[in-house]
Structure formats: structure tokens, C-alpha cells
Amino acid sequence: MSKIYTPTKEEKRTINYDVENRIKQAYENKNKMALIKELLKLEKFPIKDPYIAFLRKGDETFLERNPETVERISSKLLSMDFDELIRLSEEPKEFNRQLGPMFKNWLKKLGYPFLVEDQFTNFRGGIAFLDGSDKKLGKFANEKLKCGLDKTPDFIAKVDDKFVIGEAKFLTDFGGHQDRQFEDALKLIRNKQCKAIRVAVLDGVLWLNTDNRISRDVRQLKDDEIALSALLLEEFLKSLR
């Protein structure tokens, strides 16, 4: 598995000099609204708060309409040392957030063609993958394959005339978020309305012979509920020919 999911030392995020100056000015002037607005422009907000995602998606007036949220978040920010605030904003991505790109990068190294939608739809000559953004994969899954997904699949493949849709997860532990990742994969493979072969590509602790719930559940899947390691994915695709 280390060939696919390889932890690397990520370079820290960088903040543009002018942006950092604007953040510093708002911080020193205790301009709460301006401080939050500037920090929301960064890839990583320096503190965790359940309302950050809402604030990012709101328009210019959203902050003004939520003064209590602004006050609460800005109080946390202003209680921090400025250098600490910047350091947290520049932290590299956590390993768990690198897993999706790692899997997709590995998939491309298998040597099969990645085709745009028209070429992919008309493809009949072996194994190929649909190329494109997450949005394009999600649209193809829902419009062409009638899957009704609320989350984007990690890949869509075609083996001769058969479509294969997959969700890839690397579970590093039991419980909490990891269990929810497992449930997402189960939701896909149990989606019988989807006009494609559905595969959960699972790796990590769930394959250990333990009494943990997800270890038990993966061993008790039905015959038409396909779950396998990424290391077996290519072999599985070839078996469909």
C-alpha cells in the first residue's frame, strides 16, 4: 500500500506578501470584519470552527448579517499572537486530505487511457477511465449512469462496454470520521439504481481480523457488494473483460 498512499513531507502553504500585510493591518487595528474577510480568502483558515464553511460560501453581506458569529470568531483570532495566526494559516495539508489525490495519481500510473466524455462513452477497446474534474465525474455518474449520488466518485472506468464506478478510502483508524468514510463506500456499492458495476476500494485497518464493527461488516458483505484493496483493482477490472 505504501506505493499508493505514501506520506510525504508537504511544503507549507504560502501567503502572498500583500495579503499578509492586509491581515496584519486588520489584526493590529482590531478590525474584526476585515480580519475575517482576509483570512477567509486563504486556503486554510487558522482556527477550526463549524461556521467557517458557511462564511466562505456567503456573499459580502453574509458577515454583516451574522454579527454574533463574527464577534465569537474574531475574539479567538485576536487572542492569538499574530505570528501564531500566520503559522496556522500556512500549515500543510493533513495526511488524510492527501489521500484522494494520492489514489488518483496512482491510478494514472497504471497506464490505461484517461478519456474525455465523448471518447469515453464510445470506448470499447479494453480498459479506460473518465478524465475530468470531480464535478464532471459527478455529473456523468448522475446523468449518464443514473446513480443519484450526493458525493463525487473517485473514479469511473469502462471495461469494453461495462461501466465501473468506484469510491476509494484508506482508513487509518477505527471510529468517528473513519467509520463515516466506510459508510460512504457502502452507500455506493449498495446503490442498486446505479447503471454501473459499483466498487468500494478499501485499504487500511478494516482488513485486520478484529472484532471492530467495520472489520466485521466488510467480511460480511453480500456477493454483489464488491469491496477490495486498491492492489486488486487492476486484476478486478481485467476480470470483467
Image (cartoon, grey):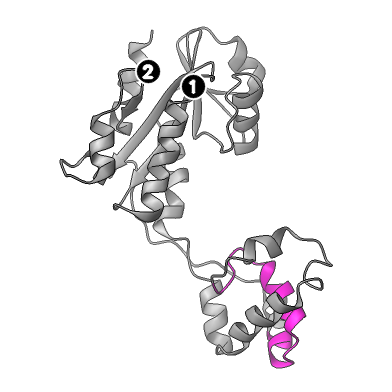
Callout 2 crowding tier (Cα within 10 Å): few <14, some 14–19, many ≥20:
some
Tell whether position 25 is magenta.
yes
- Residue 58 image position (x, y, % from top left): 76, 60
- The CA span between labels 2 and 1 is 9 Å
Name the one closer to the observer, 233 or 175: 175
- Residue at image x 22%, y 46%? 212
Dot 1 amino acid type: Ala
Per the image, label 2 sits on a secondary structure element best described as helix
Residue 132, compared with residue 206, is above or below; it is: above
Q: Which residue position is annotated with label 2? A: 237
Outermost left residue: 209
Q: Which span is picked out in magenta?
A: 24-47
Where residue 157 is drawn, which disc sits there?
A: 1
Badge 1 marks a residue whose secondary structure is strand
What x and y, as percent, mark residue 164?
Answer: 47, 20
Q: Are marks 2 and 1 in contact (CB under 8 Å)?
A: yes
Dot 2 amino acid type: Leu
